[in-house]
Structures are given as structure tokens and as C-alpha cells.
Image: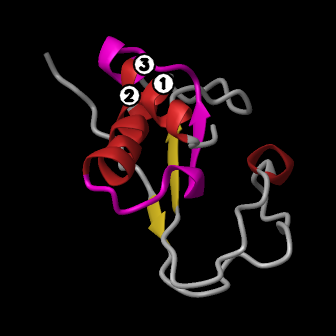
């Protein structure tokens, strides 16, 4: 079986006050993401993006594993390694998790306070 690998973008910020007063419109659904808590000291945050479905351009082929991969990377950084507090993690997912493991990991992230 051939599997297409999609790069998952992970942004880790290590700077005090990196999350200022609210959000700015940068072409992403800012209202849906919402503001992160203001950092009072050095803090890490993560934005995990996985898009399987592209509504805007029907010529783009649907992907199978981008959402699952983004969930797996978030799970690694938040739960397994403990590098990012769950409440400072955001998942931007275009589609639904395909595998049982990804669904379980997403539920664990949600229970700990990660926002989807």
C-alpha cells in the first residue's frame, strides 16, 4: 500500500507576551480559533494543522491522513512529551479523523483542554 505523506505544520512559540490582546485576521478563521491566554512568562503554544478536504477547489484530491497526522503530532507534543500545555494547543482540522487511534488521541486532547 502506498501512503502519501503530507507535512504537518507545527508552530511552537517561545516568547513572553507572544499572544497579545485578542487575535488578528490573517486569513484563517480567527473567530473559530479564539485567543490564547496571554503569556505571563515564557510559554509554549502549538498550532497543529491537518486538512483532508478542500471545499474551495474541487479539483484538489481529498487526502486521507493529514487530519490523523496533525492529531498524532499534537498528541506527541502535548501528552507524550509534555512540551505544550493542552490549553495552549490549537488544532485546525479540515475533515474528520479516519483511524480509531486518532479519534482516541483527539478525545484525550479535548479532555485535557486542547481546542479544535
Q: Which mark is residue 107?
A: 1
Q: Magenta stretch: residue 92 in it?
A: yes
Q: Is residue 62 left or right of residue 1?
A: right
Q: Residue at x 26, y 55 (%)?
A: 81
Say few, some or many: other residues with alpha carbon within 10 Å of mark 1 (under 14 / 14 to 19 / 20 or more): some
**Helix, strand or loop at mark 1:** helix
Q: Are marks 3 and 2 in contact (CB under 8 Å)?
A: yes
Q: Residue at x 81, y 54 (%)?
A: 30
Please tell me which residue lies in front, 10 or 90. Answer: 90
Q: Is residue 111 left or right of residue 26?
A: left
Considering the image in quadrants, where does the N terminus appear? top left
Scheme by which the image is coloured: secondary structure
**Helix, strand or loop at mark 2:** helix
Q: Residue at x 78, y 64 (%)?
A: 26
Q: Are marks 1 and 3 in contact (CB under 8 Å)?
A: yes
Q: Residue at the far left: name it.
A: 1
Q: Which residues are magenta?
A: 81-103
Q: Position of residue 116 (x, y in %)?
A: 63, 37
**Helix, strand or loop at mark 3:** helix
Q: Are marks 1 and 2 in contact (CB under 8 Å)?
A: yes
**Quick check: 44 above or below 51?**
below
Indicate the quadrant where residue 96 lies: top right
Residue on which disc 3 sits: 103
Indicate the quadrant where residue 113 lies: top right
Q: Position of residue 60 (x, y in %)?
A: 56, 30
Q: Which mark is residue 105?
A: 2
Q: Distance between the Cα atoms at labels 1 and 2?
A: 5 Å
Q: Distance between the Cα atoms at labels 1 and 3?
A: 6 Å
Q: Position of residue 36 (x, y in %)?
A: 70, 62
Say few, some or many: other residues with alpha carbon within 10 Å of mark 2 (under 14 / 14 to 19 / 20 or more): many
Amino acid at each position: 500500500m502506498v501512503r502519501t505523506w503530507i507535512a504537518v505544520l507545527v508552530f511552537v512559540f517561545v516568547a513572553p507576551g507572544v499572544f497579545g490582546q485578542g487575535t488578528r485576521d490573517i486569513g484563517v478563521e480567527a473567530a473559530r480559533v479564539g485567543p490564547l491566554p496571554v503569556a505571563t512568562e515564557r510559554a509554549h503554544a502549538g498550532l497543529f494543522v491537518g486538512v483532508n478536504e478542500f471545499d474551495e477547489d474541487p479539483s484538489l484530491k481529498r487526502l486521507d491522513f493529514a487530519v490523523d497526522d496533525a492529531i498524532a503530532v499534537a498528541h506527541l507534543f502535548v501528552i507524550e512529551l509534555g512540551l505544550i500545555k493542552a490549553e495552549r494547543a490549537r488544532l485546525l482540522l479540515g475533515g474528520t479523523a479516519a483511524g480509531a487511534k486518532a479519534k482516541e488521541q483527539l478525545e484525550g486532547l479535548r479532555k485535557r483542554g486542547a481546542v479544535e
